[in-house]
Amino acid sequence: MTYIPTYLKTSVGLTDRQSLIAQTASLVLICLLLPVCGGLSDKVGRKPLMLASTILYVATPLPAFLLFREPSVAAAFGGMALIVLAQAASTAIAAVVISEMFPTRGRYSSASISYNVAYMLFGGTAPLVATWLVSATGSTLVPAYYVMVIAAVSTVFVFLLPETLRAQR
């Protein structure tokens, strides 16, 4: 989501104002979805919601980036809204899932190191990689494929995670 306003400006032709209006609206949407997803994880479990998130991350980027091709705030918001569906499901429970994966004794260190290393490698480099991929391939859809591949690999790892909802530590 941090790369999309730049993408909309450089690849689609929206102004800074237009792309930021669409992003602000999508951030309002995620704020509404976060408590819903958090509550849902308390009912159905962390793993099913994380699996839903990774599957949505595989399914939504391509339609989102196809919507982004239409240079309008409404299309930009529509594309971002698709991505926000996947993002809300994972963001709402990421801290809980990571914390519940580790025993209490080393929880803070283990959780912070694993989260921050993963974020540094994938989240921190995503705008750079996406910009490079667009430049190298000439395709404005390649950032969607990049997200989809990472999400597909993540789905395998999430599938292997234990359910932590009722786990006692």
Image: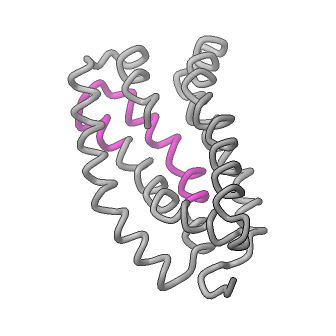
Q: Position of residue 169 (x, y in %)?
A: 69, 83
Query: In this image, 3 relative to 134: left or right?
Result: left
55 horizontally vs 89: left or right: right
Q: Nearer the viewer, residue 71 or 151?
A: 151
Q: Is 144 in front, or is 107?
A: 107
Q: Quadrant of residue 162?
A: bottom right
How many marks overall? 0
> Is residue 76 one of those drawn in magenta?
yes
Query: In the rendered image of this protein, does residue 82 appear above or below residue 47?
Result: above
Q: Is residue 16 left or right of residue 160?
A: left
The residue positioned 73% from the left and 64% from the top of the image is: 106
Which one is in front, 95 or 128?
95
Q: Is residue 65 above or below residue 165?
A: above
Q: Residue at point 58% right, 37% down?
A: 123
Colouring? one colour
Q: Quadrant of the N terminus?
A: top left
Q: Say which residue appears at 66% left-offset and 12% top-offset.
A: 136
Give the image location of residue 38, x and y in percent.
43, 71
| Main secondary-structure element of the magenta-colored stretch | helix
Residue at the spot x=56%, y=36% of the render? 144
| Drawn side of residue 18 relative to residue 2, left or right | left
Specify start and end residues of the magenta stretch as a single range.
53-79
Q: Considering only vertical position in the picture, is 134 above or below 163?
A: above
Relative image position of residue 53 (x, y in whole percent): 55, 60
Q: Does the magenta portion include 130?
A: no
Quarter of the image for residue 34 reads: bottom left
